[in-house]
Image: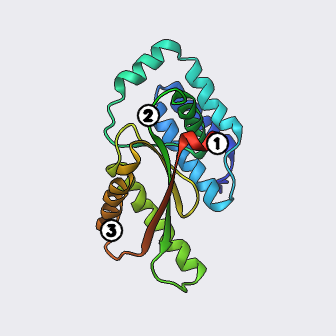
Amino acid sequence: MKIDPYNESVYYYGISHYMDEGHEDIARKYYAQIEKLFAKNLGIKPSEKLTKLLDAKKRTQGFAYIKEILAEDNEETAFECSNDEFTRLCQLEARRIKRSNEDVYVIDVQLTPHNKGLDEDLVDRILESTMSLLRNALLAGLRSEDCISVAGKDHYLILIEASEMYIPKIMERITKKLYELDKYHRADISYVYEDIKKMSK
């Protein structure tokens, strides 16, 4: 029997099972795979039913659950989230720093194939493989409190607390790491950034 890879009912029960067993990390990785599959092949996001399932399961855990998650948070690399979660984090950061002197920026990183005039299929293949390497470079080159989110087939967004003067150095480090991973230098990096205080006005 052939299984429909876009049948959300199957994914719903899978995520529910992982959450019931206390494996939220696996459930969220599973959801991220589903999200990528739907975006790549259908150009859509999974239904709210799946995201609400994650939230509902999490709420039932209560205060003890939050303490457990915080105690287990020993990640040393930057963290990755969905575009919706990234937007929400930007909103929360904008609120938090309204009355502070902290500098928080959103950096939009774009990849462009190094060679011009390539056919669209080849461009897509180059971007897909290089975006994966860029993800690794971002996670390795940023701090654990920094956040990244894929924002299209050739874009990553970064949410970072840093002085503006350090952003070029940070991006230089990430670019160097990417080209260490992609020895053929198939795509070039460009970026723009904006102060989140200005973005929220």
The answer for how far apart the CA atoms under marks 3 and 2 are is: 31 Å
Residue type pointed to by label 3: Tyr
Q: Residues within 10 Å of mark 3 (few under 14, many from 20)?
A: some
Give the foreground label among 1 and 2. Answer: 2
Percent position (x, y) of residue 7?
69, 48
In terms of secondary structure, where does tag 3 sit?
helix
- Of the two numbered discs 1 and 2 on the same chain, state the one appearing first in sequence: 1
- Of the two numbered discs 1 and 3 on the same chain, state the one appearing first in sequence: 1
In terms of secondary structure, where does tag 2 sit?
loop
Percent position (x, y) of residue 9?
68, 41
Q: Can you identify the residue that label 2 sits on?
A: 102
Residue type pointed to by label 2: Glu
Q: Residue furthest bottom?
A: 117
Is residue 194 in view? yes
Q: Quadrant of the N terminus?
A: bottom right
Q: Residue furthest top?
A: 63
In terms of secondary structure, where does tag 1 sit?
helix
In this rendering, would 200 be left or right of 118? Answer: right
Question: For this rendering, which residue is in front, 104 or 18?
Answer: 104
Q: How many marks?
A: 3
Is residue 84 in view? no
The answer for how far apart the CA atoms under marks 1 and 3 are is: 39 Å
In this rendering, would 113 be left or right of 142? Answer: right
Q: Can you identify the residue that label 3 sits on?
A: 179
For residue 10, which numbered disc appears in the image?
1
Residue type pointed to by label 1: Val
Q: Quadrant of the C terminus?
A: top right
Percent position (x, y) of residue 160?
44, 43
Q: Are marks 3 and 2 in contact (CB under 8 Å)?
A: no
